[in-house]
Amino acid sequence: ISKYRPFTPIVLPDRQWPSKMITTAPIWCSVDLRDGNQALPIPMSVEEKLEMFDLLVGIGFKEIEVGFPAASQTEFEFMRRLIEGDRVPDDVTIQVLVQAKEDLITRTFESLRGARKAIVHLYNSTSEQQRRIVFGLDKPAIVDIAVRGVRQVKELVATIPETAITFQYSPESFSLTELDFALEICEAVVDIWQPTPEHKIILNLPTTVEVSTPNIHADQIEWFCRHLRDRESAIISLHTHNDRGTAVASTEMGLLAGAERVEGTLFGNGERTGNVDIVTLALNMYSQGVDPCLDFENLPAIQQIYEKCTRLTVPMRQPYAGELVFTAFSGSHQDAINKGMAALEHSRSELWDVPYLPIDPKDIGRTYEAIIRINSQSGKGGVAYLMESEFGLQLPKAMHIEFGKVIKQLADVRGSEILSNELYTAFEQEYLLRG
Ligand code: KIV
Ligand code: ZN
């Protein structure tokens, strides 16, 4: 961690800048097995969900939403396999989602039988659009749905004293809900649940659909945190979707605005454009010297299991994970990277300081091998670097230019990338075979 510098502010004379920074990891909750799974063209089988669950535990998630057990027999059976198979480590809490409907809540509690602990996540939709179009109900009727739901959960919790239950409530479609109404319904739920600073309630405020710029999301979160009556007894949780492509930024801004928990998925799987990508969020923190408390030391192995279980492919430009994110095609970038690497080696500094590479790829199980690729855009520096790093051949300076031209020409003619074995063949033909 210490090899990454926190972002260094340029101090302005008249104000502190930046005003806030993320300095600690939030409570992470993976929703891969629920929001992620429900959005897959082919949902995961029970076996695949188990493999994914073990992966999430290995990464270090302490809270994992494992499904919506009242929604289907597969979901119910998965819960039973987890509990009866004793698959849940002591330091991990499983979370189950349920809509505020009597029969679904009853079934959810049946799925929980024998669990040591769990988070019961109750939701109902609250926005003006949902009230008008989907439910045809007014505000008091929507509050009533939530209140009846939480009352039933409270009664059922009393019947299973052997299971430690934490309660979570989501005003679904929070991002499109009038703020004062979102607060009113959450306060009504809080009044019934009666949380304390020792036994907090989780209030999860989803951008079910991302409809605004990240600063507006942050304003909503900040307003909510400021106006909640008993802030000490609540954990404010973010659940962002990526409809505008800004879920990561919205989440980071939401944390700065006062939230302390984040729900999301690996590589941003989830409904439509996905949930927020926790890998990016965590590694953004890591690159700023903040311990994300999640282990992505072997990101390629994580990606492999993820792709197998979800049948999705991580895009080539995906931050940190994409195949191309530690490559440099342009000659000037290649040159700068070479200089950075050389300076680092020379200084023996512990601090990562290489242009164009925000983190050391090695830290997440990626390698340098693919960093320098040679195509028609590359300069002489990249060619010389590869000759040395791949084949141990230190070309004299004059040869950098000469051989660089040869390779550029070859790449132009070919119209494609030159692989390192082809680079060596070209070198052989140009200098060795000709004698
Ligand atoms: O996006 C959403 O609003 C949800 C809720 C059920 C929390 O997934
Ligand atoms: Zn969601």
Image: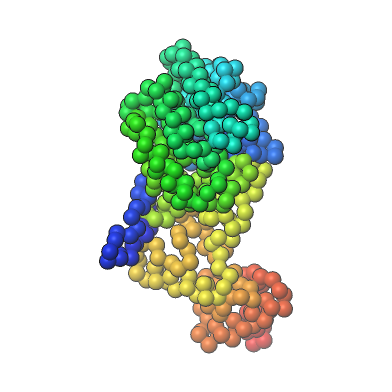
Q: In terms of depth relative to the viewer, which is nearer, 185 or 242? A: 185
Write the residue at 67% across / 81% down: 409
Picture layout, residue 338 above or below residue 40:
below
Measuring from the top left, give residue 288's x and y in whole percent: 39, 55
Measuring from the top left, give residue 368's x and y in whole percent: 52, 63
Measuring from the top left, give residue 132's x and y in whole percent: 61, 33
Residue 255 position by quadrant? top left
Write the residue at 57% across / 52% down: 245
Would residue 62 be seen by someone viewing this image from the given angle?
Answer: no
Write the residue at 48% across / 70% down: 337
Q: In terms of depth relative to the viewer, which is nearer, 85 or 78? A: 78
Determine the residue located farthest toward the top in the rendered image: 159
Measuring from the top left, give residue 37's x and y in whole percent: 62, 36
Residue 222 position by quadrant? top left
Q: In which quarter of the image is the C terminus?
A: bottom right
Write the residue at 56% across / 36% down: 128
Would residue 374 be seen by someone viewing this image from the given angle?
Answer: yes
Picture layout, residue 230 above or below residue 295:
above
Specify the color scheme: rainbow
- Total numbered labels: 0
Determine the residue located farthest toward the left in the rendered image: 13
The answer to whether 353 appears left or right of 134 in the picture is: left
Picture layout, residue 62 above or below residue 250:
above
Q: In terms of depth relative to the viewer, which is nearer, 201 or 211? A: 211
Residue 380 position by quadrant? bottom right
Picture layout, residue 157 above or below residue 343:
above
The answer to whether 162 appears left or right of 17 in the picture is: right
